[in-house]
């Protein structure tokens, strides 16, 4: 029995006090024989559920029963509630859902404050609701095993219509990705959510099975890493720390800093470093210095009066 089925099974009985095995089997999509096996398993674990025979019988739970605190430790209850609430922020109307009700009930068993974590994946902009809608669409497609179609802007700047068989939403680095089978490329792909537009679920079922190992990364994160030494002015140090992990950082008297950090050796790296403007000076490697200098000249020519 899955843990979510265990919770729902017990909660249905707590709310209804009594249900027939046929009703429960229909609710969970299993046989009545399976329902009775679940009943035995719950009884053995100490949950006071039992079967009543004859007319008006069925499966029942003691009226005074609330979810036994012994099922989880205090730390486990807090972890479950926090995780469910975090997942609820991924989109859709979380309030009133089965997950929200379950979190509320488990929260009531806790002695400590279970409201210590709040997660919101939407950006600091009025378009934040669009991100939640996208998450809700993709989550629904993954759970229902339905393919999706969308317009995608590739790293080469091409906007193409894609059809994908979605498997998983993945957060790595500083970005969300959809891990899916791409019908156009006939291969597994990580699609960056920020580059997806006009996402729509289709009626076609997901049939592909992922072959990539769990520790695989999106293509951008498979790139070789290079060590960069730089001097950064005080106003941009926080922006650098948002983007990279600095192995070394020495703050000077004027609040500027000399830093050493690693970065993926990808085409957009120098363009990104150039966005720091005069507040960052690359000291090494020489190749990166030269490429940034060339980019700066091209930008300067665009604005030449």
Image: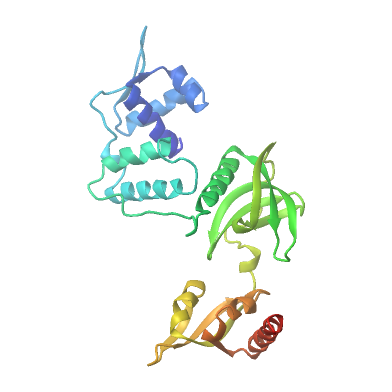
- x, y percentage for residue 284? 59, 90
Between 57 and 202, the residue placed more toward the observer is 202
Q: Quadrant of residue 206?
A: top right
Identity of the residue drawn at 59% across and 79% down: 273
- x, y percentage for residue 236? 47, 80
Q: Position of 59 compared to 278: left or right?
A: left
Between 263 and 136, the residue placed more toward the observer is 136
Identity of the residue drawn at 73% across and 66% down: 156
Q: Quadrant of residue 304?
A: bottom right
- x, y percentage for residue 56? 36, 9
- x, y percentage for residue 205? 68, 37
Q: Position of 144 compared to 33: left or right?
A: right
Q: Is residue 132 visible?
A: yes
**Is residue 233 shown above or below 48?**
below
Between 86 and 186, the residue placed more toward the observer is 86
Quadrant where the image shows the C terminus: bottom right
Q: Quadrant of residue 21?
A: top left
Between 189 and 86, the residue placed more toward the observer is 86
Q: Is residue 224 visible?
A: no
**Is residue 240 shown above or below 136?**
below
Identify the residue at the far top of this view. 55
**Is residue 160 shown above or below 254?**
above
Number of marks: 0
Identity of the residue drawn at 64% across and 72% down: 223
Q: Position of 240 compared to 167: left or right?
A: left
Q: Position of 265 compared to 172: left or right?
A: right
């Amino acid at each position: 029995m899955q843990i979510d089925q265990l919770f729902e099974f017990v909660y249905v009985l707590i709310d209804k006090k009594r249900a027939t095995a046929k009703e429960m089997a229909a609710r969970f999509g299993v046989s009545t024989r399976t329902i009775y096996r679940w009943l035995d398993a719950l009884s053995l674990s100490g949950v006071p559920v039992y079967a009543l025979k004859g007319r008006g019988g069925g499966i029942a739970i003691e009226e005074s029963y609330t979810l036994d605190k012994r099922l989880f430790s205090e730390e486990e209850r807090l972890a479950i509630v926090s995780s469910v609430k975090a997942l609820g922020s991924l989109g859709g109307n979380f309030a009133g859902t089965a997950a929200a009700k379950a979190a509320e009930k488990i929260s009531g068993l806790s002695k400590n404050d279970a409201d210590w974590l709040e997660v919101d994946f939407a950006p600091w902009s009025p378009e934040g609701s669009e991100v939640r809608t996208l998450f809700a669409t993709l989550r629904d497609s993954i759970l229902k095993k339905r393919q999706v179609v969308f317009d995608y802007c590739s790293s080469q700047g091409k906007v193409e219509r894609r059809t994908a068989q979605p498997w998983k939403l993945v957060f790595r680095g500083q970005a969300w990705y959809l891990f899916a089978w791409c019908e156009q490329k006939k291969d597994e792909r990580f699609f960056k959510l920020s580059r997806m537009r006009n996402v729509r679920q289709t009626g076609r079922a997901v049939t592909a099975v992922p072959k990539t190992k769990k520790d695989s990364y999106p293509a951008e994160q498979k790139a070789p890493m290079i060590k960069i030494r730089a001097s950064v002015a005080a106003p941009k140090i926080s922006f650098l720390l948002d983007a990279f992990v600095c192995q070394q950082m020495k703050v000077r008297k004027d609040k500027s800093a000399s830093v050493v950090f690693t970065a993926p050796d990808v085409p957009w790296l120098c363009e990104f470093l150039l966005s720091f403007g005069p507040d960052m000076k690359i000291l090494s490697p020489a190749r990166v210095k030269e490429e940034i200098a060339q980019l700066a000249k091209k930008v300067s020519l665009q604005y030449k009066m």
